[in-house]
Amino acid sequence: MQEMSSTPADVVVIGAGIVGVMTALELQQSGRSVLLIDRDGPASGCSFGNGGGIGPNTCIPFALPGILRQIPKWYLDPDGPVIVNPGWVLRSFPWIWRWLLSSRESDARRSAKAMQYLYEGCLDSYRSVLGSVLSADLLREQGYLYVYESETPGRGEIFAMALRRELGIPFRQIGSAELREMEPALSPVFRRATLLPGNGHTTNPKRLVDALFERFRTAGGRFSRAEVTGFATENGELCGLTTPEGAVPLRQVVLCAGVWSGGLAGKLGVRVPLVAERGYHVTYRDSPIRLNHKIMNGSRGFGATSMETGLQITGTVELADIAMPPNWDRTEALTRMAEKMFVAPLEGERSRWMGGRPSLPDSLPVLDRSPRFGNAFLNFGHSHWGLCGAPRSARLVADMILGRPLPTALGAYAWVRFK
């Protein structure tokens, strides 16, 4: 744990993933002194190994109409895009039930609208903070390309297209011939694709967070490596954090601890169905396969991206306790599926990774104030879209802390939606 002044910062931010770092930067740029605290250091969780997607034109929640008939496969197919860890089967039912409720058309539409609002302008926000040189180095904007093996779309895909039309999200249907020209490395197994222009990705999620963290430190931000275990109160008011190394005094606090936020949020009077939606990646260093877009395999539920670290195959969902050991069979399943995706064989030194996405059933985060302590704020639960949602989430929470006018759209992210 690094040395800390006995004088509390104006705001303590718990969590140094992309959401926490962007929140710390936003508050710092608004004139507040900030202490950022994390048990493992910057970008040590999902911000290290995610698929890198930064999509201002993203609006499709994970729960869509038609998922009910898919759920039996989650419990039975070990190679499916979504599985439930056998040790978590009984505990999964309440969350799956809420997920089903979120898949109703009216609920999915509300989530889509709230996602669009939260992710709008996210690429431009990163460019503004990073500056032109780092932006050119770390960001790409070729668009997302969803590729499909089937000739006709299924129910969920049709609904997703309808949502995009309703919300004015640009997209274009691509035939097999044009797809071959756009991405010659892809296998002919893909019959069609959907292009979402205006979306992009980072070439290295870890290095992106590190660059933003360095901006924070250079501007005078303080950082401490410590595990937050609870909160200290005095006369009914929140006055500090508890850690194994001792107490950390505070004036205001923002909880941005990703998948670890659930237990701490409970101590702030907030109970939400936050789970570890565990994702995996396999990276082939020095792979000869080069992709021109960020590719989403819409038929199999995973993605492929050319990054500076190599060809990264990312995705699938495993519902499990975050403390369970990694299920490396999931990376083998990713490898088997990826081998069918390209015209060339997968080559290069292979590495693998697992991380827990902090997921709520409706695909939306919690952006709110604690009902128990007026100086505690919540910013967690961004699921697959932390890079997309971090900039505006940070701005909205900073607006709450600074007493600025708040948009009516903020109600979509209130924790009470789960009461």
Image (tube, rainbow, N blue to C red):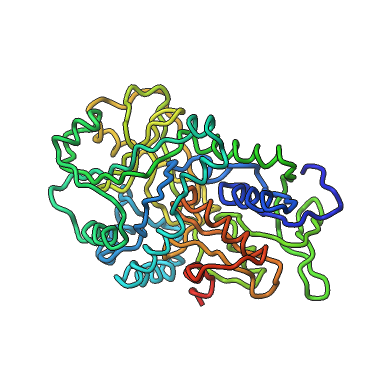
Q: Nearer the viewer, residue 147 or 30?
A: 30
Q: Is residue 365 left or right of residue 398?
A: left
> What residue sits 65% from the left and 50% below the top?
24
Q: Is residue 334 visible?
A: no
Specify the farthest residue to the front.
405
**Outermost right residue:** 6
Quarter of the rendering containing residue 346: top left
64 versus 298 height, above or below: below
Which residue appears at 53% of the width and 44% of the height?
A: 47
In the rendered view, would you say 385 is above or below 176? below
In terms of image quadrants, where is residue 286? top left
Q: How far from the left and from the top, in percent, is residue 270? A: 60, 71
* Quarter that holds the N terminus: top right
**Residue 66 location (% of width, % of height):** 25, 65
Is residue 64 shown left or right of residue 391? left
* In this view, 214 is above or below 77: above
Give the number of marks: 0
| Residue 210 location (% of width, % of height) | 60, 37
Q: Quadrant of residue 68?
A: bottom left
Image coords of residue 91 (percent x, y): 46, 66
User: Looking at the image, which residue is at 54% across and 57% down?
Assistant: 393
